[in-house]
Amino acid sequence: MEIQWYPGHMAKTRRMIGEQLKNVDAVCEILDARIPRSSRNPDVDGLTAGKPRLVALNRADQADPEGVRAWAAFFREQGWAVLETDAKSGAGTAKFSAAIRELLADKLRAYAEKGQAGRVVRVMVLGIPNVGKSTFINKVAGRKTARAEDRPGVTRSKQWVPVDKGLELLDTPGILWPKLGDQEVGLHLAFTGAVRDEILDAETLGCHLAAYLADRYPEALKTGYKLPSLPERAVEENDVAYGWRLLEAAGRRRGFLVSGGEVDTERMAKILLDEFRSGKLGRFTLEMPEENVL
């Protein structure tokens, strides 16, 4: 599977990021705590090289707590500051200002020595589409300043957002990379809604997600869909075939039947995706630091 989705405004965003770096003191990268590797644009490291970095593991409330701890430790080992947040409720966002000032402590001391103690700190906020960036900015700022919607590709232009007298944020449009050739990355982005649902067939995507959860989080599937047990997977059965049987079993329990008593697996797939994305099914981390190299 290869996802290609690179609207013209994303190329424009890359240029804007490069042009604006000289105007900021630090970069805040918003990641989805469920998929920290897959929700990182690999271009960001090159684009923002040399700038102090804070990583916000957003939607930490929906991620496996053990996974959040592992990723936080991993990013701190890279020399980056880390915040665990849930932008929707605001959890963790109140610590942002203090975390940035701690990250920039040496620079702020240098400013003070030059008689610039009140100089405004400016932070560029980056993230792929639909990672919660605009909601994060609104919570940090304490008011609705950035447009936020639960779909990718809403923010289209940069805007400066004042947080207090000494801190400003530069909101930037979400930026993906031109081609997502890694199937696992593409699936993870699709599971969490970071790419538009129209790009992939919902039923096929639901099959992949069901198979993944059956392998890593079987109890979540059994509890969520009241399944006494999961269908056994045949040795040679691929994810789509096995996932389809899981959707059929879950759909039957939910009563999603069509004429002839067959299960509406497409409807079940959409329900599974919705309940996974909303956190209703539980807390999941789909990748761990030791499994992938960033």
Image (cartoon, helix red, strand yellow):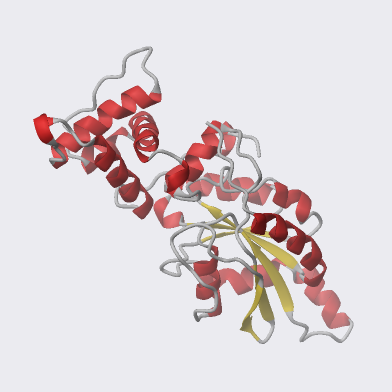
Residue 258 at x, y percent in the picture = 14, 37
Residue drawn at (70%, 63%) of the image: 27
Residue 16 at x, y percent in the picture = 75, 64
The residue closer to the viewer here, 106 or 144, is 144
Residue drawn at (19%, 37%) of the image: 251
Q: Relative to residue 85, is residue 249 depicted above or below?
A: above
The residue closer to the viewer here, 17 or 261, is 261
Residue 165, by quadrant, is bottom right
Residue drawn at (31%, 19%) of the image: 233
Residue 118 at x, y percent in the picture = 76, 86
Check the picture and name the quadrant holding the C terminus.
top right
Q: Is residue 273 left or right of residue 1?
A: left
Q: Relative to residue 15, is residue 228 depicted above or below?
A: above
Q: In this view, does 229 lie to the left or right of 64?
A: left
The residue closer to the viewer here, 235 or 81, is 235
Residue 89 visible, this angle: yes
Residue 287 visible, this angle: no
Q: Is residue 74 left or right of residue 214?
A: right
Q: Relative to residue 109, is residue 155 depicted above or below?
A: above
Q: Residue furthest top?
A: 235
Residue drawn at (43%, 43%) of the image: 191
Residue 20 at x, y percent in the picture = 77, 67
Q: Residue furthest left?
A: 260
Q: Relative to residue 173, is residue 75 depicted above or below?
A: above
Total number of numbered labels?
A: 0
Residue 3, by quadrant, is top right
Residue 163, by quadrant, is bottom right
Q: Is residue 142 left or right of residue 279?
A: right
